[in-house]
Image (cartoon, rainbow, N blue to C red):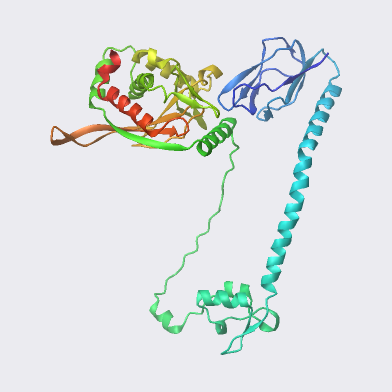
Amino acid sequence: MAEVIRMPRMSDTMTEGTFVEWHKKVGDTVKSGDILAEVETDKATMELENYVKGTLLYIGVEKGKSAQVDQVIAIVGKEGEDFNALLESEKSEKKEEKKEEEKPTQQEEKPVEKTEEKVAEKKEEAVEQTKEIISDDERIKASPLAKKIAGDKGIKLSDVSGSGPEGRIIKKDIENYVPQTTEKAEQKMPVMEIRQYVGEESYEDIPVSQMRKSIANRLAQSKYSAPHFYLTVSINMDAAIAARKALNAVSPVKISFNDLVVKAAAMALRQHPNVNSSWLGDKIRKNKHIHIGVAVAIQDGLVVPVIRFADNKSLVEIAMETNDLGTRAKARKLQPQEWEGNTFTISNLGMMGIEEFTAIINPPDACILAVGGINEVPVVKDGAIAIGNIMKLTMSCDHRAVDGSVGAQFLQTLKQYLEEPVRMLL
């Protein structure tokens, strides 16, 4: 008997997926474990695995098109089997569900629309059907609204031609009135030639990808539901620069400044577990494990691969894992378990020349750390002005779970680790 294949939920935030490529076509024999298609989700492009043995009888979503979670995307059965009745049954159920959903909406919206239209019509009639008013000096016919607008704009009614009944001046006459230039004014104003530029207005509508939809929904929800507050601290990176240079001289993989920040943040979270928490509505979850998400910019979006148990890893391990995750993230080859489970997030725009910025909290975290670039600036050392390498960090906190003093104490510890990197090696 033919069996329906539905769009699975391939990530925790997925609502729909776009078919990048079908690896099977109608008429092909398929078995459990075969890859039917590649699907772009809100996080990555993933392989859609088959779980039914038989012949692919029907494909319901074309390449490049999207399907909602649980939507019918294919039908597998015996070769030559009639699947139309099964497909019609699915369509009928969807239509019934849609009707049930739309009924209350239509009943509520129609009266509102009619009421709004009537109110608008009455207001317009009230404005246009105002009584005539005759000015005391020149007995000019004008509506009260026209007279008021003319007074506000400093326009003399005698200079305006009326388009209403019997030459009455109405609102649009005042709005369309252009003052006549006097000869004296023309003499004072320089004569300039106005060049007419002929061009073509154009634009391009770009379809919103699944990833961009997810980013928009999640960050909007975070920004407007979590009360953000921000804490900024300046870090003297002189010692970190020297330590990184020494480490890279012997390290099998290049260690970046971001790797130093990840390691320092992980160790600071160990001392300040309240920052390593999540707001869950009726409770605050204080995570005992430290999984740090590192934001990675990719084409048309952003992904946050997770470095798990970062506090227990060396700088070399963090550097190797960050490079691997970043490379596969840009190729959209990450698996769900590699971008889920973060307890704290770091976003670094320093390499792009950004001095400092604020980031939107990445749910379910209570905090996110925004890392700026390292800049040479004047600093006071031993009572004298010298050149120092300063990096600014700004932490966005969810005030429901983290208080200002808690966040400040965390940043103090983080500052100590980065200004004295040898602490991280103990």
Pick the front one: 284 or 294: 284
Q: Which quarter of the rendering shows the C terminus?
A: top left
Pick the front one: 308 or 80: 308
Residue 178, image quadrant: bottom right
Residue 16's spot in the image, x, y percent? Answer: 65, 28
Give the answer, above or below, for where 175 lies relative to 411.
Answer: below
Residue 423, image quadrant: top left
Residue 252, image quadrant: top left
Q: Taking 289 as reference, is 41 left or right?
A: right
Q: Using the rendered image of the protein, determine whether residue 209 is visible from the camera's viewpoint.
A: yes
Q: Residue at x 29, y 14 (%)?
A: 425
Pick the front one: 282 or 408: 282
Residue 321's spot in the image, x, y percent? Answer: 42, 15
Give the answer, above or below, for where 187 lies relative to 314.
Answer: below
Residue 392's spot in the image, x, y percent? Answer: 32, 33
Q: Residue at x 86, y 19 (%)?
A: 82
Q: Taking 270 as reference, is 279 left or right?
A: right
Residue 40's spot in the image, x, y percent? Answer: 60, 25
Q: Residue at x 83, y 13 (%)?
A: 1
Q: Using the rendered image of the protein, determine whether residue 177 is visible from the camera's viewpoint.
A: no
Q: Taking 410 as reference, is 150 left or right?
A: right
Pick the front one: 354 or 202: 354
Q: Taking 294 as reference, is 351 left or right?
A: left
Give the answer, above or below, for where 183 lies relative to 49.
Answer: below
Q: Residue furthest front?
A: 282
